[in-house]
Image (cartoon, helix red, strand yellow):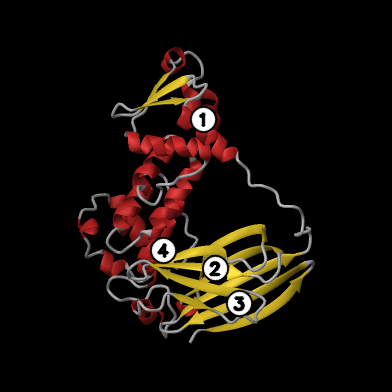
């Protein structure tokens, strides 16, 4: 049976609710495919729910529910061994509807227990412990009239899909063509903006030749127009290179997050090399932390390690593992 500890405190006009949800023998629970959902008691200020999805419970979705409408900030933290914690998600202040389950985060089975049976994100006794913090404020009136969601993203995406009023043709490396707009491209990417400044070939011909293949270029254009990256979890490696090439910092961050989720012992070296190649500093730091956190001996036995040719990369790994300073500068 899972258990929950509940505390509250007040900070000015904000009330902070902290819930510690502990689920014992969590790996065994994941192997019990008949159990697809866990919930906390209904008599608390907040209810919590965990849904196990996929054929082998590979995906764990986390939800919460409030019995009344609130304006709150939600933080989910994973409690690890040795009293360490890892922040999973933070959702800034927003209005929460009453008695409606709110999605908070997704965990993956592969991140909780690795292929060799080591429990990465569990406590010493095999329990999964999640810390929820809900910061509730009365600074705004949560009962205000409903405001429709913005359509700006969808409206701009329709410009790409329809090609209306386009003034530039963008070609992929494999010959696909996209009708696009100078103003949109230039406002989102300094690299693309440079194509239309001064007396460039692109400025004269209104044709931009891209080195990207069509499937990647379309994803990049979708992000430029809509700020969405629907395939970031499918092709994060290729999108990271594209984001670096066109200097799309937010897309680059999304790719780093997706690659971090996929991090394993087997692909750690390749991920580190990719991060180094494209100056993905956050991903590089997280990968080095992964290697340092008890994984180094396993990683030296992988194919990726055997193929490393960069002395500087090996030196970086060695220096990071040997230092106790987790804030060491990563270049």
Task: Specify the quadrant of the image occupied by residue 287.
Answer: bottom left
Residue sitting at x 32%, y 63%: 264
Q: Which label sits in the foreground, 1 or 4?
A: 1
Near mark 1 (Cα within 10 A), the count class, few <14, some 14-19 or many ≥20, is some
Q: Mark 3 falls on what kind of element?
A: strand
Marks 3 and 4 sit apart, C-alpha to C-alpha, by 27 Å
Q: Mark 2 falls on what kind of element?
A: strand
Relative height, residue 270 to residue 88 (above, below): above
Q: Please state which of residues 18 and 264 is positioned toward the viewer in this rendering.
A: 18
Q: Is residue 168 left or right of residue 138?
A: left
**Labels 3 and 4 touching (C-beta < 8 A):** no
Q: Earlier in the sequence, mark 1 or mark 3?
A: 3
Relative height, residue 103 to residue 200 (above, below): below
Q: Which residue in the protein does label 3 denote? A: 19
Q: Residue 171 in the image: state x and y as whole percent.
A: 36, 25
Q: Which label sits in the foreground, 2 or 4?
A: 2
Marks 2 and 4 sit apart, C-alpha to C-alpha, by 28 Å
Where residue 289 is drawn, which disc sits there?
Answer: 4
Near mark 4 (Cα within 10 A), the count class, few <14, some 14-19 or many ≥20, is some
Q: Residue 52 in the image: state x and y as whole percent.
A: 42, 71
Q: Is residue 15 left or right of residue 191?
A: right
Q: Earlier in the sequence, mark 2 or mark 3?
A: 3
Q: Which residue in the protein does label 1 denote? A: 159
Q: Which residue in the protein does label 2 denote? A: 63
Where residue 234 is drawn, which disc sits there?
Answer: none
Marks 2 and 3 sit apart, C-alpha to C-alpha, by 13 Å
């Amino acid at each position: 049976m899972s258990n929950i500890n509940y505390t509250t405190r007040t900070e000015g006009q904000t009330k902070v609710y902290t819930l510690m949800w502990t689920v014992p023998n969590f790996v065994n629970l994941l192997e019990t495919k008949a159990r697809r959902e866990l919930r906390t008691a209904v008599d608390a200020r907040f209810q919590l729910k965990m849904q196990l999805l996929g054929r082998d419970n590979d995906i764990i979705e986390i939800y919460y529910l409030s019995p009344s409408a609130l304006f709150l900030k939600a933080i989910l933290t994973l409690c690890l061994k040795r009293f360490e914690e890892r922040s999973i998600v933070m959702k800034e202040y927003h209005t929460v509807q009453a008695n409606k389950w709110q999605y908070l985060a997704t965990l993956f089975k592969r991140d909780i227990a690795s292929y060799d049976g080591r429990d990465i994100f569990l406590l010493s006794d095999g329990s999964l412990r999640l810390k929820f913090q809900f910061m509730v404020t009365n600074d705004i009136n949560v009962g205000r009239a409903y405001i429709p969601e913005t359509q700006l993203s969808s409206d701009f995406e329709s410009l790409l899909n329809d090609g209306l009023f386009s003034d530039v043709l963008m070609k992929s490396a494999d010959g696909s063509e996209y009708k696009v707009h100078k103003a949109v491209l230039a406002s989102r990417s300094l690299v693309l903006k440079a194509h239309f400044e001064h007396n460039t070939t692109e400025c004269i011909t209104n044709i931009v030749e891209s080195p990207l293949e069509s499937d990647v270029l379309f994803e990049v254009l979708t992000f430029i127009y809509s700020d969405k990256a629907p395939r970031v979890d499918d092709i994060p490696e290729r999108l990271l290179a594209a984001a670096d090439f066109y200097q799309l910092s937010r897309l680059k961050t999304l790719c780093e997050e997706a690659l971090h989720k996929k991090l394993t012992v087997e692909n750690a070296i390749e991920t580190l090399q990719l991060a180094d190649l494209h100056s993905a500093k956050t991903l590089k730091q997280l990968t080095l932390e992964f290697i340092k956190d008890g994984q180094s001996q396993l990683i030296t036995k992988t194919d990726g390690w055997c193929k490393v040719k960069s002395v500087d990369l090996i030196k970086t790994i060695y220096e990071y593992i040997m230092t106790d300073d987790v804030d060491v500068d990563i270049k």
